[in-house]
Image (cartoon, grey):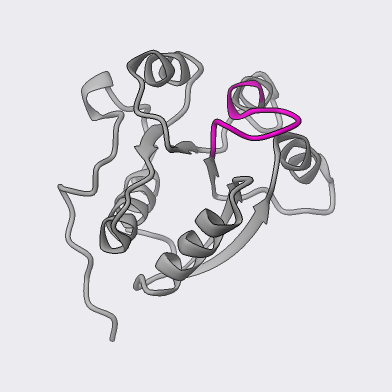
Amino acid sequence: MIPPKINILLADDDQTDCLLFKDALSELPIAANLITVNDGEQLIAELNTTKNELPDVLFLDLNMPRKNGFASLGLIKRSTKLQHIPVIIFSTTSEMDAIKQVYKEAAHYFITKPVAFFQLKKVIYEALTLISKKNNPMPLTENFVITGDSIAIPELK
């Protein structure tokens, strides 16, 4: 069950992808607060600002300037303050080596950015549903990649 209000941080340098993510999120039956940053350095600064509430989940692109997603994930997972944040890799890549690397670095899930808008809504909804489960255990390798094919989005009321 997704919490009544969820705080989401999206780290992605592609403005079009950020707008699509925001639009998809707005069409889902959840209340969300979305903050976006455009590179890994902004991400780490946002997470380390003491006045900011930590996000409930981070969607992290791998290919960003200044500090890429791989480096950002490593810093997050080695920080006692930040390591509990569920990190969902949200990338255009579908390379198996990249997927294996972020799995080893303790990302919670991996999403290859879908082309179709409806599929984008499904993967976001599935990811939020999965990370909201009680105790939120790390997935097995066979459940690491989210495709959106195993979930139905409830209708908006």
**Residue 110 in the image, given as x and y percentages of width and height:** 38, 33
- Front position in the image: 16 or 87: 16
The residue drawn where x is 59% and y is 62% is 34
Residue at the location (66% across, 33% down)? 82
Task: Specify the quadrant that holds the C terminus.
Answer: bottom left
Q: Is residue 64 magenta?
A: yes
Q: Nearer the viewer, residue 149 or 114?
A: 114
Tell me which residue sits at (51%, 17%) in the image. 105
Outermost residue toward the right in this view: 50
**Residue visible at 61% across and 45% down in the picture:** 11
Of helix, strand and loop, which mostly describes the magenta segment? loop
- Label total for image: 0
8 sits left or right of 51 in the view = left
Please provide percent x and percent y for residue 30.
40, 70
Above or below residue 125? Residue 131 is: above
Q: Where does the image place residue 29, in percent across and percent down from the top left?
A: 34, 73
Q: Is residue 75 above or below residue 86?
A: above
Residue 73 position by quadrant: top right
User: 139 or 148: which is nearer to us?
Assistant: 148
Image quadrant in which you'd find residue 139: top left
Q: Is residue 137 magenta?
A: no
Q: Position of residue 60 (x, y in %)?
A: 54, 39
Query: With 36 as the anchor, is 119 left or right in this view?
Result: left
**Residue 97 or residue 152, whichever sits in front:** 97
Quarter residue 80 falls in: top right
- Rendered-image quadrant of the N terminus: bottom left
The magenta segment: 61-71
